Image (cartoon, rainbow, N blue to C red):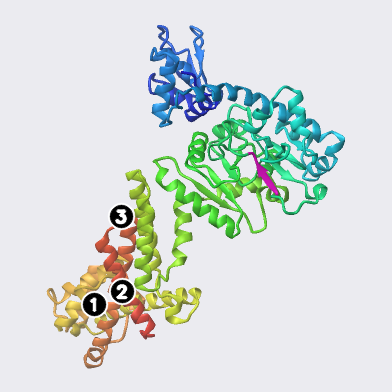
Amino acid sequence: MRFPPSFIERLRSHFLISEVVGKRVPIKKHGREYQGLCPFHNEKSPSFTVNDEKGFYHCFGCGAHGDAIEFVRKFDRLSYPETIETLARDAGIPLPKPTEEEYHRTEMEKTLYDVMEAACQWFERQLTATAGIHALDYVEKRGLKPETVRMFRVGYAPEERMGLHQHLLKAGFPQSQQAEAGLIIVPEVGAPYDRFRGRVMFPIRSSSGKVIAFGGRLLVASTGAKTLPKYLNSPETPLFKKGEVLYNLDLAKKSAREGNLAVVMEGYMDVVSTAQSGISYALATLGTAVTPEHLRLLWQLAKEPVMCLDGDAAGQRAMMRAAEVALPLLKPGYALRFALLPKGEDPDSYVQKHGKTAFEKLLMGSQRLSQVLWETVSPQFQTDLPEGRAELDDALKKLAAKITDPTVRGHYASYFRKMLWEKSSAGPQRGNTGRSPHVERMAMQHHSAALEKAARQLLSLLIACPALLHKSQVEETLSRLEVRGMQMEALRDALLAVHHHIDIDDREAFAAYLRTSLHEELPAALKLPYADVMTVESAMPLWQETLGAYQDELELEKLEETLKVEWDEQNHSRLTELKQKRSERFSANVEIDVA
């Protein structure tokens, strides 16, 4: 059977040739190419190379050369139709139906490439003709240099109703082909007319560089038409499926692969202008949201392509639509990032104002898809309430469930749990106390420092009044006491053991024992005058309550560190409980005076 050229083009662009060859022959990365032993003749040292940028393999030993289709045909010893069927099956692309109609369509497609090329050349000539003076003025005001105009083949569609149509008829392209290519509109009543009129024209090319469609930017100043769309793309045709095409792919793919960086912009003018400033890896979708096919093409260029979007509400919506499309397709090593521009800026204006370096810095600071989902979804819920946290948890679980790959899905779920835990464990919310976050942090630091001071003060009191060590409740409190610092730990252990070794009522013996146990003098901060047992004992209930809070703080800190390393539901529940206790104590304005 015959296969339409557009189908062959789609199949060829679906794979990196290194992927096709690498499944059949061992090859290794060597600079920009891959190398290996040639499968078509016997050799001991590798002379067989595979080049993704150029899309072909070549053997310097035997001269074998070709693209992915030729390699599979020759290596698997298949006929041409069998080769196409094999690659289509591997790509998951359905074969075109082998009907008489399809045969005629195949023959027409060959001619459609010709008519599109003829139209492109005509548009290019009109830009520098008398009729194109307004368009050329627009191009120059946008700062496009002549070499940029030539590289992107920018042209102009005059306002005359049948200019292109009549030109193509004279060149031998019938009305039916022009209509099939989307270049003219044939009404039910009246004469056909050009689809594009009064517009600066941007050719849309396939990955191999063939013109397959056009995008036109309306020149309102010259037409006075304010009801027409500002941007107009070709309709879908046998050559052009907008959900499967990225603008500038043919020119950007080499630079993107070399730098492992591809950035997606919203308009072709952004791509053209930024390319002139050195951003050679930019592409654009064509009047449609990002599709699975777009992502597949992008991941052939870079493992983490960046979507560069306007920072307004429309940009936020576009970001979430792209995220929804990407989730089921994520796999290890392949992700999606987002860079939001300041409000009122687009890539073109941003690069013009700030330069290439600033733009690339913006891209380097782009956010991962997981971050974007969290920062977009979490503000929608009232997380200072248990019900709100539960709703957010449910929403995040549903997002993670959309990921097909189990490894990626598990890591996303873990990331969302971690972020939810951090948000719910961030301490008292502003609504609880009426204080700003800065004041809350300062107050909490003071609270924690006071609790630690209380623990040190207890040790000081026991040194000043060792008789308290006879009390079982004091010994129990001391045995459960955790303190910071090796010196404090040594003092606590010495106090626990002291009355088992000496008479604690003998103050001199007691002091000497502590010095021996600590191998040094007591810290000056712990030296107090001898205290009255009755006075100190009456304060013990308050001290025990304070020390209980201190113990909770230490446990809380340990749980936070543990959960940073490994998530555990039981530890998270305990942490939440301790945070709630802390919040209740703090909200009640419990002040601890240990002076």
N-term-proximal mark, 2 vs 1: 1
Q: Is residue 431 above or below residue 268?
A: below
Instruction: Give the residue type at disc 1.
Output: Ala
> In the drawing, does residue 484 fall left or right of residue 84?
left
- The verdict on residue 479 being magenta is no
Task: Give the magenta-colored segment's residue range.
Answer: 230-234
Judged by depth in the image, the label closer to the viewer, 3 or 1, is: 3
- The verdict on residue 232 being magenta is yes
Sort mark 3 into few (<14), some (14-19) or many (20+) by Cα contacts within 10 Å: few
Q: Is residue 227 above or below residue 425?
A: above
Q: Position of residue 244 (x, y in %)?
A: 53, 37
Q: Is residue 452 above or below residue 305?
A: below
- Residue 511: mark in rendering: 1
| Label 3 SS | loop
Instruction: Give the residue type at disc 2.
Output: Leu
> In the drawing, does residue 232 fall left or right of residue 399?
right
Whether tag 2 and tag 1 are in contact, CB under 8 A, the answer is: yes
| Label 1 SS | helix
Q: Depth check: give the residue in front, 256 or 476.
A: 256
Q: CA distance from mark 3 to mark 2?
A: 40 Å
> In the drawing, does residue 410 fall left or right of residue 329?
left
Query: Residue at point 30% right, 55% down?
Result: 566
Q: CA distance from mark 3 to mark 1?
A: 45 Å
- Residue at the right extreme of this rendering: 130
Instruction: Give the residue type at disc 3.
Output: Glu
Pointer 3: what residue?
Answer: 566
Q: Depth check: give the residue in front, 70 or 51.
A: 70
Q: Depth check: give the residue in front, 382 or 193.
A: 193
Q: Position of residue 20 (x, y in %)?
A: 43, 24
N-term-proximal mark, 3 vs 2: 2
> In the drawing, does residue 83 fall left or right of residue 6?
left
Quadrant of the image containing the C terminus:
bottom left
